[in-house]
Image (cartoon, rainbow, N blue to C red):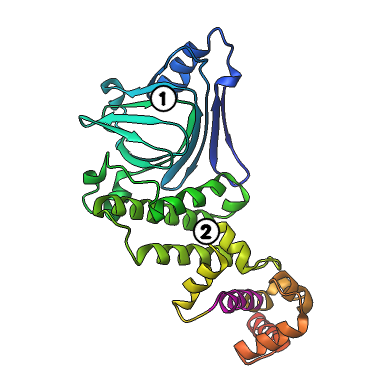
């Protein structure tokens, strides 16, 4: 029932599902263990439907990302559970189904795709009226309050489904349950920073009534660059592949790079050349052929690599390697 483990990326991930419980004791066991002990919530099925609930959560530095799906239920965080001292803010996107949230004396209905910021330090009722799913992000208050002015003013304010930052956030978060996407600490920090930025942008749009005109393209460009840096060694990487990852058209992605006076191809080439230069000066790779290094950096044509490398650095790859070897030998002889 409670499948908590350290995955290949060294991150804590857990899965919970009512499918692992016997029908006879399903509601009682789910309520007593999963809800009251693990999640600090009460839960009641709505109507006569069989209780179905599944959770997939992953803890990253500065955010817990959680995907849930359930049959109609009422979820309550009572005063009893507030004693746990959890003051985090929870940004939830209602992906499918109909839901209503009650807190601060307000009833807020969420359509499919709408989002809402809630506080874990407040009593609240969450009613899911039909089978559906949600994606949520639990973020420390200190982080969001430093990014969103008067963040408490946007608690219980609906972020409409057509908000650009919200659509971008939903698409960006899905791969974060993939170990490969978070293989290194650097990737994780980048991913979390992007999540924080997009949540802050979505909340800013809810508060101001309009999306921040320049912030959304800037966030998209940052994510595009990060994705290219992380995947530049893939020879099949293309503007279409990166655009699809971000939910953009290739032309829109090209425009983002053009806004900085460059192009997708130029940026990708620079990353590959920089990677090759670093590899050529690494002592542990001194025996690797230049062609092998070019290949590993993402190049498929050695002649093109040599021309581009010399144009960029004013030296051939072999010259750079030889200089590095001479410096290493000089330092070793001292």
In the rendered view, does 156 fall on the left or right side of 25? left
**299 above or below 47?**
below
Q: Residue 186 shows which numbered tag?
A: 2
Estimate the x, y position of residue 307 in percent, counting from the top left: 70, 88
Q: Quadrant of residue 249?
A: bottom right
Q: Is residue 273 magenta?
A: yes
Q: Is disc 2 surrounded by few (<14), some (14 to 19) or many (20+) residues within 10 Å?
A: few
Return the x and y of residue 96 as percentages of the image width and height: 47, 35
Nearest to the eye among marks 1 and 2: give it: 1
Q: Nearer the viewer, residue 192 or 301?
A: 301
Answer few, some or many: residues within 10 Å of disc 1's Cα (few below 14, many 20 plus, some between 14 and 19): some
Q: Which mark is residue 222?
A: none
Query: Which residue is label 1 attached to?
Result: 129
Q: Which residues are magenta?
A: 263-276
- Please state if 288 lies on the left or on the right of 136 as rendered: right
Q: Main secondary structure of the magenta part?
A: helix
Q: Position of residue 326 (x, y in %)?
A: 68, 86
Q: How many marks overall?
A: 2
Q: Quadrant of the N terminus?
A: top right
Residue at left 53%, top 57%?
247
In the image, what residue occupies the spot 46% across and 39% down?
95
Residue displayed at 47% across by 48% down:
170
Q: Secondary structure at mark 2?
A: helix
Residue 205 belongs to the span the image colors magenta? no
Report whether residue 322 is seen. no
Q: Nearer the viewer, residue 248 or 315?
A: 248
Q: Residue furthest bottom?
A: 314
Q: In terms of sequence position, does the residue under pointer 1 or pointer 2 come before the other?
A: 1
The residue at 52%/59% (across/down) is 186
């Amino acid at each position: 029932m409670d499948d908590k483990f350290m995955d290949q990326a060294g991150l804590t991930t857990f899965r919970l599902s009512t499918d692992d419980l016997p029908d006879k004791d399903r509601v009682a066991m789910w309520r007593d263990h999963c809800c009251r002990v693990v999640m600090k919530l009460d839960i009641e099925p709505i109507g006569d439907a069989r209780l179905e609930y599944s959770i997939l959560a992953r803890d990253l530095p500065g955010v817990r990302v959680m995907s849930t799906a359930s049959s109609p239920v009422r979820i309550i965080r009572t005063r009893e559970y507030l004693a746990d001292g959890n003051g985090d803010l929870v940004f939830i996107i209602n992906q499918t189904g109909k839901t209503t949230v009650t807190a601060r004396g307000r009833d807020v209905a969420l359509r499919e795709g709408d989002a809402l910021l809630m506080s874990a330090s407040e009593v609240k009722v969450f009613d899911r009226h039909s089978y559906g799913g949600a994606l949520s992000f639990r973020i420390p208050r200190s982080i969001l309050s430093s990014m969103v002015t008067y963040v408490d003013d946007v608690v219980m304010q609906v972020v409409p489904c057509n908000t650009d930052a919200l659509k971008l956030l939903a698409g960006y978060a899905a791969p974060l349950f993939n170990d490969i996407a978070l293989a290194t600490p650097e990737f994780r920090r980048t991913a979390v920073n992007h999540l924080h930025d997009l949540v802050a942008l979505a909340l800013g749009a809810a508060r101001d009534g309009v999306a921040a005109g320049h912030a959304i393209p800037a966030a998209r460009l940052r994510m595009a660059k990060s994705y290219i840096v992380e995947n530049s060694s893939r020879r099949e990487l293309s503007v279409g592949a990166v655009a699809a990852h971000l939910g953009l058209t290739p032309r829109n992605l090209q425009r983002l790079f053009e806004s900085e006076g460059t192009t997708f191809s130029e940026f990708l080439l620079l990353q590959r050349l920089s990677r090759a230069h670093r590899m050529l000066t690494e002592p542990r790779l001194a025996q690797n052929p230049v062609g092998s290094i070019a290949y590993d950096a993402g190049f498929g044509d050695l002649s093109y690599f040599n021309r581009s490398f010399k144009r960029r650095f004013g030296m051939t790859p072999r010259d750079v390697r030889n200089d590095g070897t001479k410096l290493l030998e000089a330092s070793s002889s001292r």
